[in-house]
Image: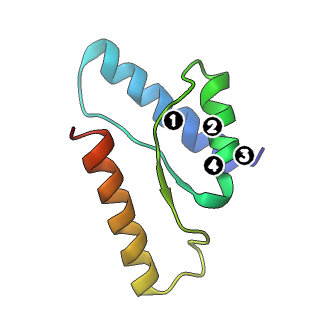
Amino acid sequence: MDWATEEVVRRAVCMTQLVASEGGTPAMGVMTCNFVSAAELMAKVLGMPGYSFAVIDHPVSSATDQELEARALQTMAAIETQILL
């Protein structure tokens, strides 16, 4: 598993657990489509199988400004459906 994927999911799950136990600002992890299976596995290992995260197109590092804007809109749509129910 990619260390960055593991760390993003670990932080998002920890923040979600904190919000659930103490209140606060909801958190959501963002994964590119190439790392979905690794993110799902990490969430399961951390005790949150089925954890919802935003999935955006891959890659990010070489994306154009227009492609990055599209990914940002993908993330906002996920936030609307998964956090701002």
* Colour convention of the picture: rainbow
Disc 4 marks which residue? 36
The residue lying at 67 percent from left, 23 percent from top is: 45
Left or right side of 49 for 64: left
In the image, is residue 55 above or below residue 84?
A: below
Could you tell me how far apart the alpha carbons at marks 4 and 1 are, in whole angstroms?
Answer: 16 Å
Q: Residue furthest right?
A: 1
Could you tell me how far apart the alpha carbons at marks 4 and 2 are, in whole angstroms?
Answer: 6 Å
Q: Residue furthest top?
A: 21
CB under 8 Å between discs 4 and 2: yes
Q: Earlier in the sequence, mark 2 or mark 3?
A: 3
Q: Which of the 4 image quadrants contains residue 58? A: bottom right
Report the amino acid beneath label 3: Trp
Label 2 secondary element: helix
**Residue 25 - label:** none
Disc 3 marks which residue? 3
Report the amino acid beneath label 2: Glu
**Residue 40 - label:** 2
Q: Earlier in the sequence, mark 4 or mark 1?
A: 1
**Picture quarter with the C terminus:** top left
The residue lying at 66 percent from left, 33 percent from top is: 42
Q: Residues within 10 Å of mark 1 (few under 14, many from 20)?
A: some
Could you tell me how far apart the alpha carbons at marks 1 and 2 are, in whole angstroms?
Answer: 14 Å
**Picture quarter with the N terminus:** top right
User: Toward the viewer: 65 or 70?
Assistant: 70
Disc 1 marks which residue? 11
The residue lying at 61 percent from left, 40 percent from top is: 7
Q: Residues within 10 Å of mark 3 (few under 14, many from 20)?
A: few
Q: Earlier in the sequence, mark 1 or mark 2?
A: 1
